[in-house]
Image (cartoon, grey):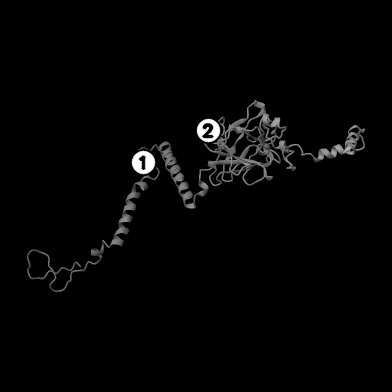
Amino acid sequence: MARAFLLLLLATFAPVSTAGSPTQGDESMLLQKRPPKGTSGNLEDDGDQDSNKYVYNPKEAKTAADSMPDVEGQAPPVPHWHACRFQAKAGGVYDLRPMMRLAATLEDDWVHKDATVSGVSYYLNICANTMQVPRACKKLAKKDPSPAYQIGSNGHCFYLGTLKTFKWKPIDSAVPSKGMILAYQNGERCTGGRTRQIKYTVTCSEAYGYEDGPLVVYETRGGCHYDVHWPNKAGCPTNTVIAGLNSWGPGSIFLVVLVLVLCVYVCGGCFYKRKAEGAQGIEACPHHTFWCALPAMFMGSFQFVSDKMSGANSSRAGFTRVPTTAGSSQYGASDTGTGISDDMF
């Protein structure tokens, strides 16, 4: 026991040797083992160090390609940022830029409460990181830029994705007018190593303006996935085709085109005949004699077909001639016996 106490005293008051202290090269080795910038809270290197390159800045959009929309199913036209404009295959472009919060305009982040759990809130942005990292995250020494954060009721903070991992698609590719989905992945890791991700469902609704925030935000039952339901007129694509046109058959499209051609024919013909020929009333309609006779032509054709199918003309078809031999009828009130025969048949 005394020996152990003596060894403890020697270890305490012995001069510290600098031979084992880390050198400058050793310090660099230690720094390399630390989680890289942009992955605080993660033990793995997720490769998000350059996520800031994906922030869309309208002032830096110098070429036409910088503002080109991301086409559904294709890579973004610009290698890094996405211009917050998305083009559906079926036609129409979603422009979410009015929903963005920009530092240049000193706008605040979108802040929303969890719809299912009390005391939980979210800081959100679209197509850009939030204006600033929430205070709760700073207290935990987390400085990861992200378009979305979750602040728990216990003060815990998690970032929910990175701009680099954005994905999008229409809610219904055949009907772009329903709206679009924008997702950010590779957020802070949950228990088990899964990364958090957040999904914005921006439905088309003219009743909600650009200044209206999300309607519902919540964490899914399985955890680590977050849903944002956001009705907004930004979810209505511009320059879109007729809703559902791609789901029509050739016959439906033909009828639509036929109706449009007839409208142009009638309206254009009437305008020309009034201006060029001075026609008035029904005579101003193009080919009015033909169109006036057309109902009678249809009725005659229908009557003919109906008679053929019902046999209404069978009495005429079965008519027999009166014989001209003896005993045939004679014309005249008096009969002189000369036998005027009825040979008209």
Q: Residues within 10 Å of mark 1 (few under 14, many from 20)?
A: some
Q: Which residue is at 36% across, 41% downward?
A: 283
For the residue marked with disc 1, what is the amino acid? Glu
Residue 35 quadrant: top right
Residue 6's disc number: none
Q: Which residue is mark 2?
A: 208
Q: Which residue is mark 1?
A: 283
Residue extending furthest front? 1
Quadrant position of residue 6: top right
- Residue 98 screen position, x and y as percent: 60, 32
Query: 257 or 274: which is nearer to us?
Result: 257
Question: Which amino acid type is shown beneath numbered disc 2?
Answer: Tyr
Q: Is residue 134 visible?
A: no
Q: Is residue 275 above or below residue 290?
A: above
Placement of the C terminus among the 4 image quadrants: bottom left
Give me the residue at 23% from left, 64% from top: 315
Task: Tell which of 182 and 336 is nearer to you.
Answer: 182
Residue 210 is situated, as x and y percent measured from the top left of the image, at 56, 31
Proximity of marks 2 and 1: CB atoms separated by less than 8 Å: no
Q: Which residue: 7% across, 70% down? A: 337
